[in-house]
Image (cartoon, rainbow, N blue to C red):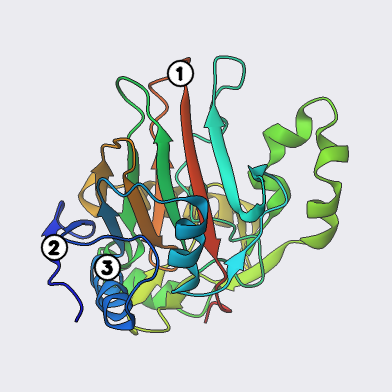
């Protein structure tokens, strides 16, 4: 029998901490269903004190779909799907922008499961924001205007700082050739809940199709700012063995890089997604 989950929402539009569960393998199908429902409702769910081994982490992710590999990062030995996100005094954090992961892909990820291994003594929170709340916060007139538009998402734009580093073009050559710019609907309908999401982000979205460059730049700037409204967001304080599982079709996120040069190591498995519609 699946345990009774304790679900504690942590903010208005999204985010909930879930207690009363052990995520080490094997997971009961009934528990997986409960967690899937919680993710659908809260868009990002958090767990505490989950000392998962790499194979537990991989099994947990596989309960929700196929892992997606990301060629731009290193991984845990023996687990190509288990990406290492590590900040050290020599390797400062690179991304300080609100984004939805990997929207440069034809089929961006369904979500990611991020687990904390080494946490700085202070700082280093992560923020998430709801693409549903952002969509619902627009006026009817602007919603009608945006519905049906498409936007261009571009790997090169999101990784422009890495590409500018010495050897960056060579290191990321495979990713560049595998990922030409793609188009996605600006307003995406969530495949499970049917809710509408404002699906653009500052890291990868470069252009609204059919608008002049000036119009597109101005409209995107407004939408990016709108998406970052604090009332659409939640903020999570990490501890060792904390886990965050977000629906990448419903959210964007932003690291708060106030801890460097302290050491932080997170490990992430990304789950493959479907074609945005
Ligand atoms: Fe990310």
Tell me the CA gap for discs 2 and 3.
32 Å
Q: Earlier in the sequence, mark 2 or mark 1?
A: 2
Tell me the CA gap for discs 2 and 1.
32 Å
Residue 22 rendering spot, x and y as whole percentages: 26, 60
Image side of residue 64 versus residue 208, left or right: left
Please say whether residue 22 is visible from this viewpoint. Answer: yes
Q: Residues within 10 Å of mark 3 (few under 14, many from 20)?
A: few
Q: Residue at x 43, y 50 (%)?
A: 114
SS for callout 3: loop
Tell me the CA gap for discs 3 and 1.
39 Å
Query: What residue does disc 3 label?
Result: 139
**Snapshot quadrant of residue 24:** bottom left
Residue 266 rendering spot, x and y as whole percentages: 47, 39
Using the image as rendered, state which of residue 28 and residue 82 is in the foreground: 28
Q: Earlier in the sequence, mark 3 or mark 1?
A: 3
Residue 164's disc is none
- CB of residue at label 3: within 8 Å of ligand 1? no
Residues under numbered marks 3 and 1 in contact, where contact means CB atoms less than 8 Å apart? no
Q: Residues within 10 Å of mark 1 (few under 14, many from 20)?
A: some
Circle 3 or circle 1, nearest the eye = 1
Query: What residue does disc 2 label?
Result: 7
Q: Residues within 10 Å of mark 2 (few under 14, many from 20)?
A: some
Q: Residue at x 30, y 74 (%)?
A: 40
- CB of residue at label 1: within 8 Å of ligand 1? no
Query: What residue does disc 1 label?
Result: 260
Please say whether residue 151 is visible from this viewpoint. Answer: no
Q: In the rendered picture of this protein, how many numbered marks are placed on residues?
A: 3
- CB of residue at label 2: within 8 Å of ligand 1? no
Q: Residue at x 54, y 32 (%)?
A: 86
SS for callout 1: loop
């Amino acid at each position: 029998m699946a345990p009774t989950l304790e679900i504690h929402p942590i903010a208005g539009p999204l985010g909930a901490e879930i207690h009363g569960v052990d995520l080490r393998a094997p997971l009961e199908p009934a528990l997986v269903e409960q967690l899937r429902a919680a993710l659908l409702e809260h868009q990002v769910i958090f767990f505490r004190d989950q000392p998962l081994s790499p194979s537990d982490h991989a099994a947990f992710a596989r309960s929700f779909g196929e892992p997606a590999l990301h060629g731009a990062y290193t991984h845990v030995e023996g687990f190509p799907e288990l990406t290492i996100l590590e900040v050290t005094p020599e390797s400062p954090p690179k991304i300080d922008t609100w984004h939805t992961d990997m929207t440069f892909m034809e089929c961006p990820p369904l979500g990611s499961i991020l687990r904390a291994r080494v946490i700085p003594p202070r700082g280093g929170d992560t923020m998430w924001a709801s693409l549903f709340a952002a969509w619902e916060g627009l006026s009817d007139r602007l919603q009608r205007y945006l519905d049906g538009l498409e936007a261009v998402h571009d790997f090169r734009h999101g990784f422009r700082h890495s590409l500018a580093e010495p050897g960056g073009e060579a290191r990321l050559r495979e990713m560049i050739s595998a990922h030409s710019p793609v188009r996605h609907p600006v307003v995406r309908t969530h495949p499970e809940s049917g809710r509408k999401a404002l699906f653009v982000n500052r890291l990868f979205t470069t252009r609204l199709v059919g608008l002049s460059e000036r119009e597109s730049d101005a409209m995107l700037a407004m939408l990016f700012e709108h998406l970052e409204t604090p009332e659409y967001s939640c903020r999570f304080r990490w501890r060792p063995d904390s886990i965050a599982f977000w629906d990448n079709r419903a959210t964007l996120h932003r690291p708060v890089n106030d801890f460097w040069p302290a050491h932080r190591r997170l490990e992430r498995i990304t789950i493959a997604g479907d074609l945005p519609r």
